[in-house]
Image (tube, helix red, strand yellow):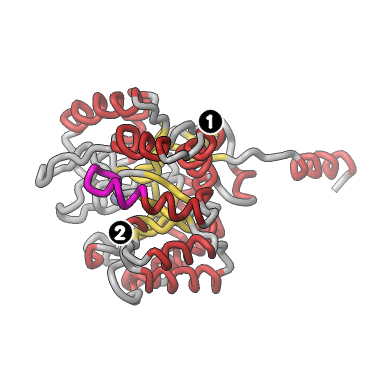
Amino acid sequence: MNRRTFLASAATLAAPQSPVVMTVRGPIAASSLGLMLPHEHLFSMFGEDPAEHAQYDSDALLAAVVPYVKSVQKLGCATIADATAAYFGRAPRILKTLSETTGLRIVTNTGYYGAANDRYVPKFAHDESADQLAARWIKEARQGIGASGIRPGFIKLGVDAGPLSAIDRKLIVAGARAHKATGLVIAVHTGDNSASVEQQLAILKAEGVSPSAWIWVHANQCKDDAAVTAAAAQGGWISLDGLDPATLERHFALCQLLKQQGKLGQVLLSHDGNSFRAGGKRPMRPYTELFTGLLPKLQSAAFSPDEIRMLTVENPARAFAIRGLPFVNLRMP
Ligand SMILES: [Zn+2]
């Protein structure tokens, strides 16, 4: 290496790299995400038969979702992480169209959903190794999903109730390895299963992955407050993402508890809403309660503007920022 090349590469290494989040329209600075809902479903076919390529009536879908998204944007939402995983309705091209049509920033995912009794885990995942599964997700992260060129911004996994099954354990190991190669955060549908939280964190530790790269999805469903604060104490993200009028008090109580513990910087708030469900078995589930219910309630309980900003803007930006060296492969548009 000659001196000029050395200086150039040294400058590249020394250059401060501001954190980046991968959206369906490419990488953007994490600081520009604005208010973000970190766990919603813009659409899904959850409850329908698993399908590698989801079939939607895209005209009907867009006719329902575009006006709804616009109404949520009017409340202040700028970015949504879409938690609809492969095999129950992920459709990156429709997400991109939605983003282009509305201006909403959208983050999609890679990984497999092992909850719902593994219904949406593809058959080959039972036979392949954790490394083979990780390789599939790493390929999506680097080259895009299918031929779409659209890259995921997080790893979405799911586990069933009780101790981790063999397949659920393999998914967590694969997620840890895919994280190390891509820097994408690992969000695991876990719910009221604190025993599996312990197991998941032990796997991450064995794989050399920080708990700060892991999100306990649906932690609001856990009835054991000590388990929630213990996971936060270990450094994990606590996703309180089932907001609706019926769960408002529980979300509020958990926000207060985590504030008392000094862990507000690890809390994510969302609804697990769904603005279009193929098959139409259940009515759409709104994602507005944060704006109309929880934030006003937090403000009246003396949560400061800085704390509200932390919960709704800064925490999601930090949670979804791509970690480590993978940054160098990202080209900003
Ligand atoms: Zn969900």
Task: Classify mark 1 as within 8 Å of ligand 1 or not, answering yes or no.
Answer: no
Residue drawn 54% across the image and 57% down it? 212
Residue drawn 15% across the image and 52% down it? 48
Specify the amino acid type for callout 2: Gln
Q: Which residue appears farthest toward the right when viewing the image?
A: 3
Q: Which residue appears farthest toward the front when viewing the image?
A: 301
* Mark 1 residue element: helix
In the picture of the structure, the residue carrying the numbered disc 1 is 32
Image position of 146 with respect to 167: above or below: above
Query: Residue 176: percent from the left, percent from the top?
Result: 49, 64
Q: Disc 2 vs disc 1: which is toward the camera?
A: 2
Specify the amino acid type for callout 1: Ser
Tell me: 112 left or right of 151.
Answer: left
Which corner quadrant of the image does residue 280 belong to?
Answer: top left
Query: Residue 66: percent from the left, percent from the top?
Result: 26, 26
Closer to the camera, 218 or 321?
Answer: 218
In the picture of the structure, the residue carrying the numbered disc 2 is 221
User: In the image, is residue 246 part of the stretch drawn in magenta?
Assistant: yes
Q: Which range of residues does the magenta coloring cover? A: 243-252
